[in-house]
Structure formats: C-alpha cells, structure tokens
Image (cartoon, grey):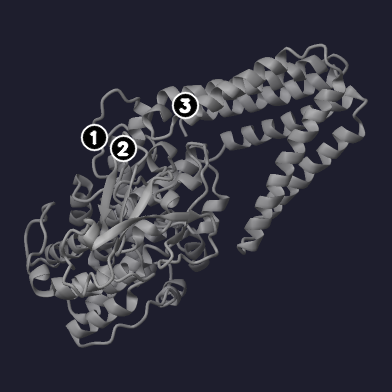
C-alpha cells in the first residue's frame, strides 16, 4: 500500500467516525442527512460502476452489464435524495431490508465456511447476527425516526474503525536471493 | 495442471533429461509440492509464510481484496501458476488500469520463463522442480491471469469442448488436429457452482466459481470461472475470453501438453548442464519421435487424473518404483532441524527456491511499471537465510 492509499484510508475512517458522532449528537435533525447519505451511496456506486465500464469493462466480452448497473444505481440515488418529505418509517423499513439482507448473506457465508472445515467463520457469523438484530430493531422501533439515526450511526462507526485499522496494516516486502 | 503431470510426468521428463532415479524423484516432488506449500502448511512446520507457493481454498475464502491482499494473491499465483507471457504487451486504446491486468495474462515461451529456468540453474533439485511446475503451468493456464480480475478471466455461456468420435484413438487419430465433424463434435460445457461435487467428464459437468461483478473478487482469479476444466490434459475447448474482443479462442490441451513435456525435457537438460543455453520456442525433439504415441494416448484419455498411466510410463523408463506423493515426507526433517540447519533441509532448499522465484517475478512486474504484485528486494547471498527471516 502506498503512503497516499494508507493516508486516504485512515482519513476516510476518521471522517466516518466523526460523522457518526455528529449524527448521534444532533439525532433530531439527522434524519435528512441519512437520506442524503443513502442517496449519495447509490449515486457514488452508480458512478463507480459507470467509471468501471468506461475504463475497464467496455473492453470485456459482456461488459455492458456494468453500464446498465451503473445507470440503475444512479437512478436509485436520485430517487432516494428526492424523498425529503416521506415519513421516517419508510427509511427505517429501507434500513431493515438492507440489514436483513446483508445479515442473511453473512450467516450463509459463515455456514459455508464452517461446512468447509474452516475455523474462521465466527467473525462472519457475528456480523450476520448483528445485522439481523439491527433489522429487527428497525422494525420494532418503526415509529421512532431517532432509532434510524442511531442504527445508521452505529454502522458508520463500525466501518470507520475498520477503515482506520486497515490503514495501519503492514506492507509485505519480499526478500530473495537473485 | 494436476498431480499426474506435475509429479509423474515431471519424473518421466527428468529421467529422459538424464537425471537418475533419486534426483528425478526430488525434482518431481518439488514440482508437485508447489501446489501444496500453503501458508497453513508453512505455519504448521514453523517456516516463513512469505514462501507460500499456493493458497488453499479456505485461505482464499478468508482473504480480503484490499490492495495488500491483492498484491499477496498476485505474487503467489503469477509467480508459480500463471507466469505472465509479456509484461510489456501493447493493446491500442486501453487504460493503464486495464493494461496492468492484461499484461499478466499467462502464456508459454515468454521472457519470464527464460528467466525462471535460468534462475533455477545451479540452485539444486528443489529449485529445478519449482521451475518445472511454472513451465508446465504456462501451457495449461494460457490465456488466464494470476490475479483476481473480471475483465481478463471471465468466461460466459459460449464454452464448448471437442469430443472425439468413438474409436478416435483406435483409428489412429492421436496426434492430429481433430475438429471436423467426422472426427468428433463440439459439445457445450455445463458449469455448476458445486465445489464439493467431483467433475463428471462423461456427462461434461464441471464445477466453476460463481459469477461476481466485482472486478477483484477472488472468484475471478485465474481459470476459476472455467473451473478445473483447463487443467485436464484431454480437454480441447473453444470459448470467448473476456479480453479477446469477441474472437473465439481454441485451446488444444493434448497438443500443448505434448509441447510442455518436450520443453521440460529440454529445460532440464539445460539445468543438468548437458546444454549451455536455454532458449524459448525450443523443444526436445527426440521425445515426440520416440515416445510421442505413448504420451498422446495418456494425454487424450478422458479421465479425472492420469496418475496411473504416467506412473506406469515412468516406471517402464527407469525400471524403478515411483512412490506415491506424500506431502508429509519432509516436514519432520524441517520442523526438527535447528535454526542453523533448516536451510539445508529438503523443504529449506525448496523455500529458498520459492522465495527466489517469487522475488524475481514480483520484481519484474514492478519494474514494468505495474504495482499489482507489490515490491520485492534482492539481497546479497550472505545476508539472506531462513534463520534471518525469523529475526
């Protein structure tokens, strides 16, 4: 990893942690911010997919798929950001679906890893269980928009910490006799 | 390639190149050990993990795809299993990011192969075995890259294998190019994502990795998208490589494996000192003349592995028994050796060869302006030993 890549990961991680903190502090007004974040998330993914198409996938057999995915994700982003006046419960519902899906996938992956005899399934399983629990929280507290802010902030905090840790990983240098 | 070629066929090639029975066994053991020397194994025997020459399926499942992990994966797979053919290949109107991956496409007779064989000269039988593994795989793994990349390694529905008509071999078709209707047919290959089920060569059912749209997903490493199919010596297939601009590519394994075998004999004659120069595109000519028909028969037989046939051939050549490959054969010797003695054990010498090969390939990729495999650093002979690795 170059110094720039390392710095980028650490700064991005710190930024995520700070945003999570600010959102918890101003939980009453943070609901709109979440919508913007989710919308931006889709937009960035869509633009990323289109960038991937124009720089890489357009040279590949069947690569147009990346372009279609990019356009669809961008559309989702635009729609999400235009939902400024929808009731908060829809955002919670959206978060519930997102976490439930991610959780089930993680649990299935953990199960497959365990079936193959690996001991490294516990972290995946705990991620999956936490995601499912968050999904349940979203549904239980569907009338309380503040909960959406806490759940979203918790996810941001976790991702931020992981980013910072990954920025400190050592770069392997291979030594050999020529 | 699999154990049949890396172990038994390499033994045959070493013996035909002039090595004795015991030396041939050491060479072919090292060639096969490349497919088993994972981090898990090195951890178990207390050896430096940088020397890993392969990754177990489980290790790959747990590997992430950030920059550092990708460099680690590429160092292993490009150095030992998918040696790049041309690190300076050109293709018009492509981005650098694309070309960094395109230039890692594996293929035979590249400049790196010459460097691989030359590097092994004078460094013992273990290093010779490593070089033979790399050489053989340049033929089997052609057209795929040793890094996770969708834009290079993906395959799609358009994938057919050529099935010889019944009695093809008996009718004397062995050794000829078979593609007309009278000699056989092109049959669509059915891939399934079921790693626990063995391939069914009769029904044409093969396991492959899942399609993942993520460019650097581990599923897009090497020939994962085509499963084990490209490793079978009998396979003759046509498909649309992701990088091939919609041009159909025909890969004829029996013909390529024949060349691989002849080139191994030629390379090992160089390593033994019988010839002074190793050049690419050169093959041992006596082998096809004398044993061509026998080798063809083994290569064309539709079977999951051809160990028994190659073993029989090898034992006929040397008149000696070839023991089955035993992965644990030299592990105790290494584990129990003192720190100063480890370098001189069988696995110690293998590790030195593996580090040299990995370092050389990583360094060459880096020199070409490509950061996918990371960095390497050459150190003077007296400064590097396995003992120093622990420091």
- Say which chain tag 3 marks: A
Label placed on residue B244? 2
- Say which chain tag 1 marks: B
Label 2–label 1 contact, CB within 8 A: no
Residue receiving disc 1 = B88
Viewed as shown, does residue A44 lie left or right of B14?
A: right
Q: Position of residue B191 (x, y in %)?
A: 47, 54
Q: Residues within 10 Å of mark 1 (few under 14, many from 20)?
A: some
Tally of numbered tags: 3
**Residue A143, placed above or below residue B342:** above
Callout 3: SS: helix
- Say which chain tag 2 marks: B
Q: Quadrant of residue A97?
A: top right
Residue receiving disc 3 = A52
Callout 2: SS: loop
Q: Residues within 10 Å of mark 2 (few under 14, many from 20)?
A: some
- For the question of whether residue B284 can be seen, the reply is yes
């Amino acid at each position: 990893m170059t110094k720039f890549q390392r710095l980028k990961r650490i700064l991005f991680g710190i930024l995520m942690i700070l945003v999570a903190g600010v959102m918890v502090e101003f939980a009453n007004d943070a609901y709109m911010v979440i919508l913007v974040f989710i919308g931006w998330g889709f937009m960035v993914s869509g633009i990323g997919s289109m960038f991937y198409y124009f720089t890489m996938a357009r040279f590949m057999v069947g690569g147009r798929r990346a372009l279609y995915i990019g356009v669809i994700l961008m559309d989702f982003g635009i729609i999400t950001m235009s939902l400024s006046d929808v009731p908060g419960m829809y955002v919670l519902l959206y978060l519930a679906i997102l976490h439930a899906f991610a959780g089930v996938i993680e649990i299935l992956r953990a199960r497959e890893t365990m079936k193959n005899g690996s001991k490294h399934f516990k972290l995946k399983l705990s991620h999956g269980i936490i995601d499912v629990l968050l999904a349940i929280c979203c549904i239980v507290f569907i009338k309380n928009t503040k909960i959406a802010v806490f759940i979203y902030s918790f996810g941001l905090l976790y991702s931020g910490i992981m980013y910072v840790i990954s920025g400190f990983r050592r770069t392997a240098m291979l030594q050999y006799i020529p | 390639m699999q154990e049949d070629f890396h172990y038994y066929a390499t033994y045959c090639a070493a013996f035909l190149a002039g090595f004795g029975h015991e030396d041939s066994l050491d060479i072919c053991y090292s060639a096969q050990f490349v497919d088993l020397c994972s981090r898990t194994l090195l951890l178990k025997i207390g050896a430096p993990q940088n020397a890993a020459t392969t990754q177990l399926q489980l290790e790959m499942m747990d590997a992430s795809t950030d920059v550092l992990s990708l460099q680690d994966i590429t160092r292993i797979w490009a150095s030992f299993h998918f040696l790049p053919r041309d690190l300076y290949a050109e293709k018009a109107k492509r981005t650098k990011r694309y070309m960094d991956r395109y230039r890692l496409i594996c293929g035979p007779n590249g400049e790196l192969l010459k460097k691989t064989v030359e590097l092994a000269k004078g460094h013992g039988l273990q290093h010779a075995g490593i070089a033979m593994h790399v050489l053989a795989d340049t033929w089997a793994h052609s057209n795929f890259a040793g890094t996770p990349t969708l834009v290079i390694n993906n395959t799609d529905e358009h994938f057919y294998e050529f099935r010889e008509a019944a009695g093809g071999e008996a009718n004397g078709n062995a050794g000829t190019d078979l593609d007309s209707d009278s000699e056989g047919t092109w049959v669509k290959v059915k891939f399934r994502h079921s790693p626990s089920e063995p391939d069914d060569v009769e029904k044409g059912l093969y396991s492959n990795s899942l399609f993942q749209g993520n460019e650097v997903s581990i599923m897009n490493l090497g020939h994962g998208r085509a499963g084990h199919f490209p490793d079978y010596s009998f396979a003759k297939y046509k498909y649309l490589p992701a990088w091939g601009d919609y041009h159909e590519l025909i890969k004829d394994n029996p013909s390529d494996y024949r060349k691989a075998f002849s080139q191994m004999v030629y390379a090992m004659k160089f390593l033994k000192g019988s010839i002074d120069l190793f050049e690419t595109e050169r093959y041992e000519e006596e082998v096809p003349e004398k044993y061509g028909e026998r080798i063809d028969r083994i290569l064309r037989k539709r079977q999951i592995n051809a160990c028994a046939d190659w073993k029989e051939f090898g034992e006929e050549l040397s008149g000696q028994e070839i023991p089955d490959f035993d992965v644990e054969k030299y592990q105790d010797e290494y584990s129990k050796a003192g720190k100063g003695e480890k370098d001189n054990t069988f696995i110690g010498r293998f590790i030195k060869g593996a580090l040299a090969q990995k370092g050389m390939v990583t360094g060459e990729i880096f020199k070409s302006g490509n950061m996918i495999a990371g960095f390497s650093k050459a150190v003077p002979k007296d400064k590097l030993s396995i003992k120093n690795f622990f420091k």
